[in-house]
Image (tube, rainbow, N blue to C red):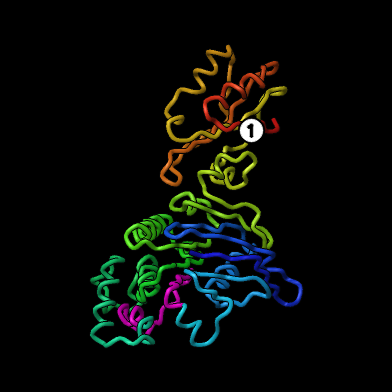
């Protein structure tokens, strides 16, 4: 649904915001691009909808080469691409209905059809009773719901989200993420979201990419990433703390999914290997609809770490030895 190939973008002559960025987002998935400020995330998403033109490379959305369009053709292509922003970007002098209707006024629709569509989309985002309210009368979460409604008004196939929850409190963030997940399921929307928060990726994404200094350094389906030794995304999704191990101990990080999560793996290992195993950290979450966990174990000095790794791997567990 969204494909970028070898995108580059340089600002002010020497700031490389995008450095050979290639990305593929499948139809109907929620794809998160995560990274710190300045990593190039916002430049990437603005390039996807044509707000920024890359120095080189291509962007295709729903079969249309966005990087080859301009003027009216680009404006028409954007009808199929909705976008929501961090700071809502609502017009203070327009009502909620007026802000949503704005996205339809450039299209060949009668006033009655616009009014009907605005009512439908406001009901969909839970603001059916707020049509005549002004932005100043709304909470932050309600303002973002207006932004989402405006982005969906023209029935896009793709929704782009640029840090849409970073200005919201945790409870409101959860409600907005739940709304995005529901819209993805109900409308079949493909969602590309930009965030600096791993909790957002953990909550709703099925795939993710990590950006650093304008480059994508890791990407893929979360189920695969979590089982990839050395994955930075996996470590950030499941921080295991910094409890120190005993001198001479062997430290192992275990990643387990699905049915393995319900098994008494560590207790059985300790019994079968006759080991006094220490637990240094653990976390378990549902990621991409699969129960997934990571555990950090400490094996006592003198343990046969090779035998332990072999036993765990045979059960479908991903094992990494980390520095003690």
Q: Nearer the viewer, residue 58 or 297?
A: 58
Helix, strand or loop at mark 1: strand
**Residue occupying the point 70% across, 75% down:** 11
Provide residue 38's location: percent of width, then percent of height: 65, 64
Provide residue 89's location: percent of width, then percent of height: 45, 77
Q: Which of 236 and 306 is in front in this view?
A: 306
In this figure, which residue is indicated by the disc labeled 1? 320
Q: Extreme front residue here?
A: 63
**Residue occupying the point 66% across, 21% down:** 305
Q: Nearer the viewer, residue 80 or 12?
A: 80
Q: Nearer the viewer, residue 247 or 215?
A: 215
Provide residue 176's location: percent of width, then percent of height: 38, 60
Task: Characterize the local packing of mark 1: few (<14), some (14-19) or many (20 or more) Cα atoms within 10 angstroms.
Answer: some
Q: What stretch is highlighted in magenta?
A: 78-101
102 lies above or below 196:
below
Residue 91 is one of the magenta-drawn residues: yes
Provide residue 249's location: percent of width, then percent of height: 68, 23
């Amino acid at each position: 649904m969204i494909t970028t190939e070898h995108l580059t973008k340089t600002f002010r002559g020497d700031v490389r915001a995008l450095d050979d960025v290639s990305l593929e987002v499948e139809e109907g998935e929620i794809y998160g691009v995560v990274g710190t400020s300045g990593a190039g995330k916002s430049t990437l998403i603005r390039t996807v909808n044509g707000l920024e033109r890359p120095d080189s490379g291509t962007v295709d959305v729903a079969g249309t080469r966005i990087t080859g369009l301009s003027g009216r053709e680009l404006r028409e292509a954007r009808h199929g691409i909705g976008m929501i922003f961090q700071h809502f970007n609502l017009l203070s002098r327009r009502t909620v209905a007026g802000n949503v209707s704005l996205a339809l006024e450039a299209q060949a629709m009668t006033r009655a059809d616009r009014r009907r569509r605005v009512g439908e989309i406001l009901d969909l985002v839970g603001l059916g009773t707020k049509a005549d309210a002004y932005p100043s009368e709304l909470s932050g979460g309600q303002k973002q719901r207006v932004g989402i409604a405006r982005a969906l008004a023209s029935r896009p196939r793709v929704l782009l989200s640029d840090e849409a929850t970073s200005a919201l409190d945790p409870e409101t963030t959860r409600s907005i993420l739940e709304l995005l997940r529901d819209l993805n399921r109900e409308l079949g929307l493909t969602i590309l979201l930009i965030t600096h928060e791993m909790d957002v990726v953990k909550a709703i994404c099925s795939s993710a990419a990590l950006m650093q200094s304008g480059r994508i350094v890791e990407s893929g389906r979360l189920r695969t990433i979590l089982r990839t030794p050395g994955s930075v995304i996996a470590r950030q999704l499941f921080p295991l703390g910094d409890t120190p191990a005993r001198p001479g101990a062997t430290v192992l990080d275990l990643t387990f999914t699905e049915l393995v999560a319900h098994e008494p793996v560590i207790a059985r290992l300790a019994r079968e290997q006759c080991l006094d195993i220490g637990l240094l950290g653990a976390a378990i979450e549902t990621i991409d609809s699969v129960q997934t966990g990571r555990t950090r174990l400490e094996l006592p000095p003198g343990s046969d770490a090779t035998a332990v790794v072999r036993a765990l791997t045979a059960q479908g567990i991903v094992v990494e030895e980390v520095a003690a």
